[in-house]
Amino acid sequence: MYQGTTEKTCTRCGNTFPGGTNQTCGPCRTTDRQCITCGKAFRGRNRQCYDCRATDRPCKICGVVFHGVNRTCTRCLSGKTSCQMPRCEEPKLRGHGHKYCAQHSAEGPQRERAQIVRRKREREFGVTHEEFLALLDAQAGVCAICGNGNDGPRQLSIDHDHVTGAVRGLLCDRCNPMLGYARDNTAVLEAAIEYLKRNQVFKPPNGV
């Protein structure tokens, strides 16, 4: 029995079946019907016949356009025991609803968080993921001010002009708030530099 399902008794024939929200078994739900689109008689569970439901659509795995009712083409369905992540041949986890192997299933929350960050970045700054990667590559993957990257899995943040909204570059979690606290005022930043120079204590090497 699939994970997440329970044994149910069909309300029509009385046979037991592994059901989720259905109250009748598969054979009882398959009846002679009339297509609501073309009127043709067919046997099945849907309200439309196969021809009316079938459309040209891209396969969600390989992207090839095919004609059918499924979200996956026949070629990919034939290997449905494998992980659906591109270029991964590991077997997917057993059980109802699993699409990926153990490693890619464990990485699912991380992929979801990354997708949320991408959508937020495009919504707030109008920067697509491809544009972000190009900007990151132009900065050699480091902060545009200090030359360091973020600690941990967090990506560099987009810095923008708060007046014009123009994107200026990518900054780490230390440099980006620094500009915000200074209100993008160069006079404040220059005064901070002079302050540090006046109060910097020279430490000789090895404490000598």
Image: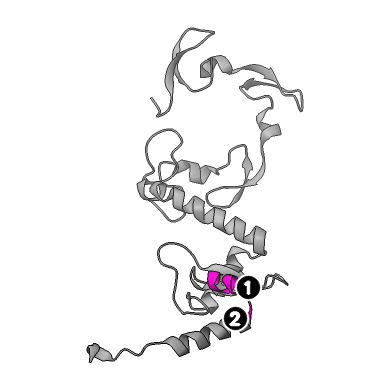
The reply, left or right, for residue 131 in relation to residue 146 is right
Could you say whether the residue bearing mark 1 is in a helix, strand or loop?
A: loop
Q: Position of residue 177 (x, y in %)?
A: 54, 69
The reply, left or right, for residue 122 in relation to residue 8 is right
- The residue drawn where x is 72% and y is 71% is 163
* 107 to 172, vertically: above or below: above
Q: Is residue 132 magenta?
A: no
Q: What secondary structure prevails in the magenta region?
A: helix
Q: CA distance from mark 1 to mark 2?
A: 8 Å
Q: Amino acid at mark 2?
A: Val
Tag 1 and tag 2, C-beta contact below 8 Å:
yes
The answer to whether one can see residue 85 in this image is no
- The residue drawn where x is 39% and y is 43% is 92
Q: Amino acid at mark 1?
A: Arg
Colour scheme in the image? Answer: one colour
> Which numbered dot is residue 188?
2
Question: What segment carries the magenta color?
Answer: 176-185
